[in-house]
Image: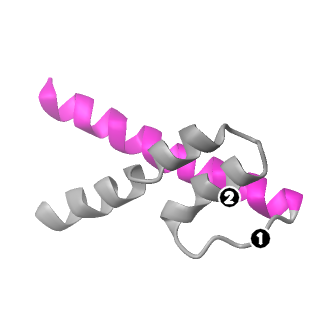
Amino acid sequence: MYGAGERFLHLSIECAVDSGNHIISDMRYKKPGSYRDIFVVLGEKHVISTELGRNLRIWPTFVIYWYMTI
């Protein structure tokens, strides 16, 4: 069950990153420097709150770290 929860979290983060990237591209916002910056850009443009953007910034790093430990 633990593994399934991790997988769902991983997929949720990937979906959020992909969705954010599509929004940034479609709206022609500035290109983020990294996956982490996607949420910052969305916060700056008020698609999400700036606080949420700062908080979500760590999640793509979590996914990369997770892959490196597997």
Q: Quadrant of the N terminus?
A: top left
Residue that sits furthest to the top in the current view? 1
Residue that sits furthest to the right in the current view? 27
CB-based contact (under 8 Å), mark 1 and mark 2: yes
Q: In the figure, 36 relative to 56: above or below?
A: below
Residue 26 lies within the magenta run:
yes
- Callout 2: few (<14), some (14-19), or many (20+) C-alpha neighbours within 10 Å? many
Q: Residue 30 carries which label?
A: 1
Q: In the figure, 31 relative to 17: above or below?
A: below
Residue that sits furthest to the front in the current view? 51
Q: Residue at the location (86% across, 65% down)?
A: 28
Q: In the figure, 1 relative to 3: above or below?
A: above
Q: Nearer the viewer, residue 24 or 7?
A: 24
Q: Residue at the location (16% across, 34% down)?
A: 3
Q: Residue at the location (81% across, 64% down)?
A: 29
- Counting from the top left corner in percent of width and height, residue 56 is at 47, 45
Of the residues under marks 1 and 2, which one precedes in the sequence? Answer: 1
- Counting from the top left corner in percent of width and height, residue 69 is at 12, 62
Q: What element carries label 1?
A: loop
Question: Relative to residue 8, is residue 15 drawn left or right?
Answer: right
The residue range painted magenta reads 1-27
Instruction: Report which residue position mark 2 lands on.
Output: 41
Q: Residue at the location (51% across, 48% down)?
A: 54
